[in-house]
Image: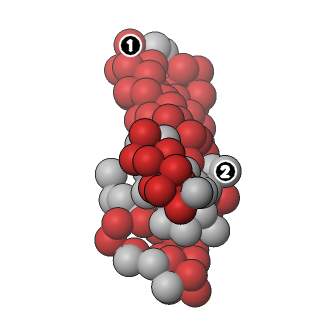
Amino acid sequence: MLYFYYLLGTFIPKAFASSPYQPYCDALGTYCGAGNVFIVLLLDRAVMIIFQLIGGTSVIAVIVGGLKMTFMGEEGKEDAKKIITYALFGIALAVVGVTFARFICQFAAFAFGENAAELCSIT
Protein backbone atom coordinates (compact mmCIF):
# COMPACT_ATOMS: atom_id res chain seq x y z
CA MET A 1 0.00 0.00 0.00
CA LEU A 2 2.87 2.37 0.79
CA TYR A 3 4.28 1.71 -2.67
CA PHE A 4 0.91 2.67 -4.18
CA TYR A 5 0.91 6.02 -2.32
CA TYR A 6 4.44 6.68 -3.51
CA LEU A 7 3.45 6.05 -7.14
CA LEU A 8 0.31 8.10 -6.74
CA GLY A 9 2.37 10.96 -5.33
CA THR A 10 4.64 11.05 -8.35
CA PHE A 11 1.75 11.55 -10.77
CA ILE A 12 -0.39 13.94 -8.76
CA PRO A 13 1.16 17.35 -8.05
CA LYS A 14 1.17 18.64 -4.52
CA ALA A 15 -1.29 21.38 -3.68
CA PHE A 16 -0.13 24.40 -1.76
CA ALA A 17 -2.48 26.88 -0.17
CA SER A 18 -2.31 30.38 -1.56
CA SER A 19 -3.66 33.65 -0.35
CA PRO A 20 -7.26 34.37 -1.32
CA TYR A 21 -6.05 37.81 -2.43
CA GLN A 22 -3.43 36.44 -4.83
CA PRO A 23 -5.53 36.77 -8.03
CA TYR A 24 -6.19 40.42 -7.15
CA CYS A 25 -2.54 41.05 -6.36
CA ASP A 26 -1.55 39.56 -9.71
CA ALA A 27 -4.16 41.68 -11.52
CA LEU A 28 -2.94 44.86 -9.83
CA GLY A 29 0.70 43.92 -10.34
CA THR A 30 1.48 44.40 -6.67
CA TYR A 31 3.24 42.51 -3.95
CA CYS A 32 0.90 41.10 -1.33
CA GLY A 33 3.30 39.46 1.05
CA ALA A 34 1.37 37.14 3.33
CA GLY A 35 -1.91 38.66 2.16
CA ASN A 36 -2.36 40.96 5.12
CA VAL A 37 -1.24 44.05 3.22
CA PHE A 38 -3.60 43.69 0.25
CA ILE A 39 -6.10 46.22 1.63
CA VAL A 40 -3.30 48.71 2.27
CA LEU A 41 -2.07 48.30 -1.31
CA LEU A 42 -5.57 48.63 -2.72
CA LEU A 43 -6.27 51.81 -0.75
CA ASP A 44 -2.85 53.19 -1.66
CA ARG A 45 -3.53 52.68 -5.36
CA ALA A 46 -7.01 54.22 -5.10
CA VAL A 47 -5.77 57.28 -3.18
CA MET A 48 -2.90 57.78 -5.61
CA ILE A 49 -5.26 57.68 -8.60
CA ILE A 50 -7.59 60.21 -6.95
CA PHE A 51 -4.79 62.63 -6.11
CA GLN A 52 -3.24 62.28 -9.57
CA LEU A 53 -6.61 63.21 -11.07
CA ILE A 54 -6.87 66.20 -8.72
CA GLY A 55 -3.35 67.34 -9.61
CA GLY A 56 -3.86 66.89 -13.35
CA THR A 57 -7.17 68.73 -13.29
CA SER A 58 -5.57 71.56 -11.33
CA VAL A 59 -2.75 71.94 -13.83
CA ILE A 60 -5.28 72.08 -16.67
CA ALA A 61 -7.26 74.69 -14.69
CA VAL A 62 -4.13 76.84 -14.30
CA ILE A 63 -3.60 76.70 -18.07
CA VAL A 64 -7.24 77.59 -18.74
CA GLY A 65 -7.06 80.43 -16.20
CA GLY A 66 -3.91 81.77 -17.83
CA LEU A 67 -5.48 81.67 -21.28
CA LYS A 68 -8.62 83.34 -19.96
CA MET A 69 -6.55 86.06 -18.32
CA THR A 70 -4.65 86.65 -21.53
CA PHE A 71 -7.50 86.74 -24.02
CA MET A 72 -10.49 88.04 -22.03
CA GLY A 73 -11.28 91.56 -20.94
CA GLU A 74 -11.37 92.95 -17.40
CA GLU A 75 -14.34 90.81 -16.33
CA GLY A 76 -12.49 87.70 -17.53
CA LYS A 77 -9.39 88.59 -15.52
CA GLU A 78 -11.25 88.43 -12.20
CA ASP A 79 -12.66 85.03 -13.08
CA ALA A 80 -9.23 83.87 -14.22
CA LYS A 81 -7.67 84.93 -10.91
CA LYS A 82 -10.26 82.85 -9.05
CA ILE A 83 -9.65 79.85 -11.32
CA ILE A 84 -5.88 80.05 -10.85
CA THR A 85 -6.22 80.50 -7.07
CA TYR A 86 -8.47 77.46 -6.72
CA ALA A 87 -6.24 75.45 -9.03
CA LEU A 88 -3.18 76.25 -6.93
CA PHE A 89 -5.09 75.10 -3.85
CA GLY A 90 -5.86 71.88 -5.77
CA ILE A 91 -2.20 71.34 -6.58
CA ALA A 92 -1.26 71.93 -2.94
CA LEU A 93 -3.98 69.48 -1.85
CA ALA A 94 -2.66 66.84 -4.26
CA VAL A 95 0.94 67.24 -3.05
CA VAL A 96 -0.07 67.06 0.62
CA GLY A 97 -2.39 64.12 -0.08
CA VAL A 98 0.27 62.10 -1.89
CA THR A 99 2.76 62.78 0.89
CA PHE A 100 0.24 61.72 3.54
CA ALA A 101 -0.69 58.58 1.58
CA ARG A 102 2.98 57.58 1.28
CA PHE A 103 3.45 58.12 5.02
CA ILE A 104 0.46 55.92 5.85
CA CYS A 105 1.62 53.22 3.43
CA GLN A 106 5.13 53.17 4.91
CA PHE A 107 3.68 53.09 8.43
CA ALA A 108 1.48 50.12 7.48
CA ALA A 109 4.48 48.38 5.91
CA PHE A 110 6.42 48.84 9.12
CA ALA A 111 3.49 47.58 11.18
CA PHE A 112 3.12 44.44 9.05
CA GLY A 113 6.85 43.84 8.94
CA GLU A 114 7.08 44.23 5.17
CA ASN A 115 9.70 46.03 3.13
CA ALA A 116 8.37 49.54 2.57
CA ALA A 117 10.34 49.99 -0.67
CA GLU A 118 8.57 46.97 -2.20
CA LEU A 119 5.17 47.73 -0.71
CA CYS A 120 4.88 51.46 -1.33
CA SER A 121 5.98 52.01 -4.89
CA ILE A 122 6.75 55.65 -5.42
CA THR A 123 5.46 56.58 -8.85
Earlier-in-chain disc, 2 versus 1: 2
In this rendering, does residue 38 appear at all?
yes
Rendering coords of residue 38 (x, y %):
60, 58
Left or right: 93 as drawn, with respect to 68: right
Rendering coords of residue 105 (x, y %):
53, 70
Q: Which residue is mark 1?
A: 71
Q: What element does badge 1 sit on?
A: helix
Residue 20: image tag: 2
In this rendering, does residue 55 appear at all?
no
Query: Observer-nearest residue: 25 or 62?
Result: 25
Left or right: 22 as drawn, with respect to 114: right
Nearer the camera: disc 2 or disc 1: 2
Asked if 62 appears above or below 14 in the picture, the reply is above
Image coloring type: secondary structure
Q: Residue at x 56, y 40 (%)?
A: 23
Q: Residue at x 50, y 35 (%)?
A: 27
Rendering coords of residue 28 (x, y %):
49, 40
Q: Quadrant of residue 107?
A: bottom right
Q: Residue at x 66, y 58 (%)?
A: 39
Disc 2/disc 1 C-alpha distance (Å): 57 Å
